Image (cartoon, helix red, strand yellow):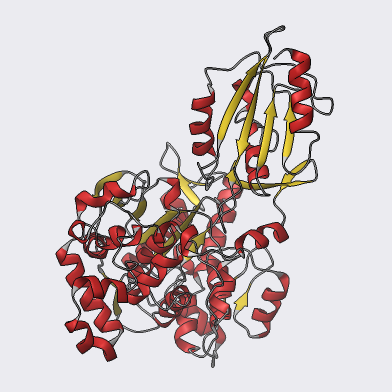
Amino acid sequence: MNEQELKQFLKEKYPKENEACEWKEFGSLKNSFSGSAGDDIISYVSAIANMEGGALVIGVEDNTCEIKGIRDFNNHTTQKIKLRILEKCASLSSEGLHAEDFTTSDSNKTIWIIHIPKHLPRQPVIAHSKAWQRIEDSLVEMRKERRDAILKEPAGYAEDWSAAIIPVATIDDLDPLAIKKAREEYKTKNQNRAAECDQWDDVTFLNKAKVTIKGAITNTAVLLLGNEESSHFLQPAIAKISWILKDDNNTELDYEHFGTPFILSTQKVLARIRNLTYRYLPDSTLFPTEIPQYDSYVIREALHNCIAHQDYSMRSRITVVEKTDELVFTNVGHFIPESVEIVIEQDAPQEFYRNAFLAEAMVNLNMIDTIGSGIKRMFNTQRKRFFPMPDYDLSNPEKVAVRVLGRVWDINYTRLLIKNTDLDLKTVVLLDRVQKHQPITDTEASDLRKQRLIEGRKNNLYVSSHVAKVTGDKASYIKNKGFDDQYYKDMIIEYIRKFHAAARADIEALIIEKLPAGLTEKQKKDKVKNLLQDMKRKDLLTLNEEQKWILKK
């Protein structure tokens, strides 16, 4: 068709810009494909998909629909651009996504129409680490009410990736040892049905455990129980867990990848983690407390949550990164609840789940707690150990990273929990944020002050050291007990601010005379060393080329 006919065609099919349609000139695809967030192709794809789907017409003038044509394709074709859009737009379905090209017969101008499917149930489409939406013909970052509407959409098994049936797979594609393990865990979870379970054949058992559907093999069945060779049924999804060992400088020391069946592989992953004995002095005592770095339930639940909540459409591995005194568990896919605080404060399960069928099967096989309670139990377990709370990093909307610390962060926090075992979980979570120098609101700070749980100024709060009433001569008390660690750290920071850098000897001269009189000279020097290392770990200080301590920018 000629230029006039093409314009008429567009006017009939896409008469105006609205929530389902956008006209963009985009003469060059070099920078307009994935360039400025909120004003490029992938942003418009995200926005239109997050409504009801629609079309993006490229190569026409905004408002007028005059044919301008695409002048620079930057090696894109209508086939390649589909794959690139899927790479850049997390959670976008490939079904219905395609691009058409039209070239005018008289003026040789080419336009593209990208047909965009509606988002999958409960899965906002992400571009540039953000979800976008349309409000009439405007593109904006997704508003809370739109996000809530998407996340509360009904989703039956037919729309749940984990419940999808693999027609060509059979029970022979499942690992017999994995099925045996599944039976053991099912009987542990459902002790009242243990004898009955022993009478079931494998097909009946898998149906009862809701791993298969009427004998048909599901994605969940292959993921949890499939033999290693059967993982190809899940493609393009990746069924892998990577364990990576790193040192404190983030240098990779070792790694191993684990595939299906996940019910057995997770045990192998957890076996790689070095759960050493950790010792600390909870108070003025000569006898240290000994405790494993990590609680087995916490790390097991963290890993199994990654499996249950992974967005398998994003074709990525689950990772477990182990460092000297921390573990980081990462899965891809946005965090469906609004915040971690909501999860740990509410007693009811969440209303919706990404992989509902998989999550239910994992509950039945004793891999995760009753849906919705596992995260809260992780926090409570850390509280009972007097350890820091798990850290949820949700800064990237396309992934969830959970850090579990295997050491005491601030001894005052630990001592306070030991002396105040009746503190509610919400208060403990706030104290944990204070010890890690993470922000809390003025109201929250005021409440903690009233309970004498924190001290310091607004921008320098710290957990109170007043876990017991000081009696007798206060001067003698300070002389023998010394100041809290924060006092010494503040002195070091002020010294470096004034002189820009400090050698180890300078800091020893500054601090040692103020340490408790009962310490030996070696103990005092060790104390200074520990203070500096702790400040380095918390990204307060670093060493320059002259091996002098400076403030970390």
Q: Along the line of sight, which residue is nearer the eye, 124 or 524?
A: 124
Q: Is residue 365 something that shows in the picture?
A: no
User: In the image shown, does 122 or 538 lie closer to the viewer?
Assistant: 122
Q: Residue at x 69, y 13 (%)?
A: 104
| Residue 442 spot, x, y in % from top left | 72, 71
Task: Give residue 522's position: percent from left, percent from top.
Answer: 31, 65
In the shown orientation, is residue 545 left or right of residue 218?
right
Among all residues in the image, which is located at the extreme left? Answer: 177
- Vertical placement of residue 414 versus 337, above or below: below
Q: Quadrant location of the N terminus?
A: top right
Image mark count: 0
Q: In this picture, is 385 found above or below 232?
A: below
Indicate left or right for 280 with 427 as reference: left
In this orientation, does residue 54 appear?
A: yes
In which image quadrant can residue 177 be found? bottom left
Q: Return the residue nearer the eye: 532 or 173.
A: 173
Q: How far across and how far down the image is residue 194, in percent? A: 23, 87
**Where is residue 425 shown, x and y percent of the image?**
53, 81
Residue nearest the viewer, comparing 111 with 262: 111
Q: Quadrant of residue 103?
A: top right
